Image (cartoon, rainbow, N blue to C red):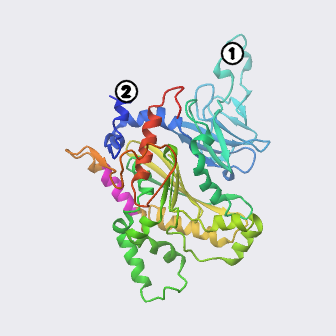
Amino acid sequence: MYRDQPERIRALVEEDRVHRDLYLSEELFALEQEHFFARTWQFLGHASQVPHAGDYVAQDIAGRPLVMVRQADGGIRVLANRCAHKGTRLVSDACGNTGKFFRCPYHAWTYRLDGSPLAIPIKAGYEGTRLTQCESGQGMSALANVAVYRDFVFVRLSDEGPGFDDYFGEVLGAIDNMVDRSPQGRLTFAGGVLRNVVHCNWKMYLENINDTVHPLSTHESATKAAQALWAGHSPDEPKPMAMEQILPFGAGYDFFDQMGARVLPHGHSVLGTRFSIHSNYAQVPEYEAAMRAAHGDQRATEVLQRSPQNAVLFPSLAVKGSPQAIRVIRPLAADRTLVEAWAFRAEGAPELLFERSMSYNRLVFSPMSVVAHDDVHLFESIQQGLHAPGNEWVSLHRGHRSGEFDDAAAQDTNGTNELLMRNQFRAWAEFMTLRMGEPA
């Protein structure tokens, strides 16, 4: 129905609405794996996950098993996680240390950390064969398109698509803002990861990251409970961390509208360009002094005064500078999405910052949190409701203006405008139908 039909795919994304097949079609999901996710830059992992030579992280990207491994010289390589012999996955654990080489559990073929072949049992049996001239004799395949930006590791699976800097552009400033919250300019993954498999299409989750209208109704029970617990306290009274983080979810529509947003090429965006629910966390004077000493007054002020709600590095990563937390979107099927929530320790910063990150992840992103269960219920309800007869379209009309994408440059807008979502779907159509040699 859609394969080799770029016009039909583009027709699914109109200026102010999208067709439900984007969420429901297994065929489209297969094409996404083949084209969209392969042509765009995907977040794989963080360098702090592999601090020592031989440390690895195994991760599937768009259905392809990969392994990120620290080299003896300190570099990072990303290899196909398969033996060149029969295709066995060389590592089965999500992370670990492989020592000085990879060893296949099936026939004991071994490979150096850079993927090159090391040894083969019964080597004499291959004399006079074509092994050394074909792919199986070359070792583990290494990805050609790997970028490490301030310890964030991204990959592009396809030879088609834009370069790293051209693809991300201005939105990389969101990573800079988070990393520079460390006086040492270094982050470390800490505290483990919260994983949640949601029975919905990945686009629903990504849309919701930029949806500021839903908190008032979707999270009403959580915010009303927090407001009741805090009733009677002076507005100037220091709040417990949980209250500090949950109460802003109940801010009115005007608050969310006025926080501002910015849309960027290729589906990226920053929500909360003026302020956000994270803007009024209690100050830590000794930390601010350390930041000014490390980065200078101007840069420290830029970093500390800017706390966007969410920055989306489309399509796989959502970043919160304060608290230092990220969400990673891992699509599994048309109706299943794995969401990972990670917290960072900002090296050289007070432990309070890490505690905020961990607290926020538990309160908002944990499958058992007082917030996430509301979202998950609605995501799965949408996935089911879209099968209903009649209306086959999903509305993205709020704030729409005809010709809003005539200028491909970045745009600033209000915080409740669905322009951020329309921007994501425009990029989806762009990369789903990209042809070799066309500009992205």
Count neighbours of disc 1 (C-alpha within 10 A) and say few if under 14, some if 14 to 19, many if 20 or more: few
Residue 295: image location, x then y, percent: 74, 64
Mark 2 packing: few (<14 Cα in 10 Å), some, or many (20+)?
A: few
Q: Main secondary structure of the magenta part?
A: helix
> What residue appears at the point 75 percent right and 42 percent down from the top-left corner?
75
Tell me residue 261's x, y (percent).
48, 58
**Residue 102 quadrant:** top right
Quarter of image, res 7: top left
Residues rendered magenta in the picture: 373-383
**How far apart are the two marked residues, 1 and 2, measured between alpha carbons?**
38 Å
Question: Closer to us: mark 1 or mark 2?
Answer: 2
The label on residue 5 is: 2
Check residue 201 for magenta coloring.
no
Q: Write the residue at 54% across / 69% down.
A: 359
Q: Is residue 308 left or right of residue 182?
A: left
Q: Which mark is residue 133?
A: 1
Amino acid type indicated by mark 2: Gln
Q: Position of residue 220 (x, y in %)?
A: 35, 71
Q: Is residue 103 above or below residue 310?
A: above
Tags 1 and 2 touching, CB below 8 Å: no
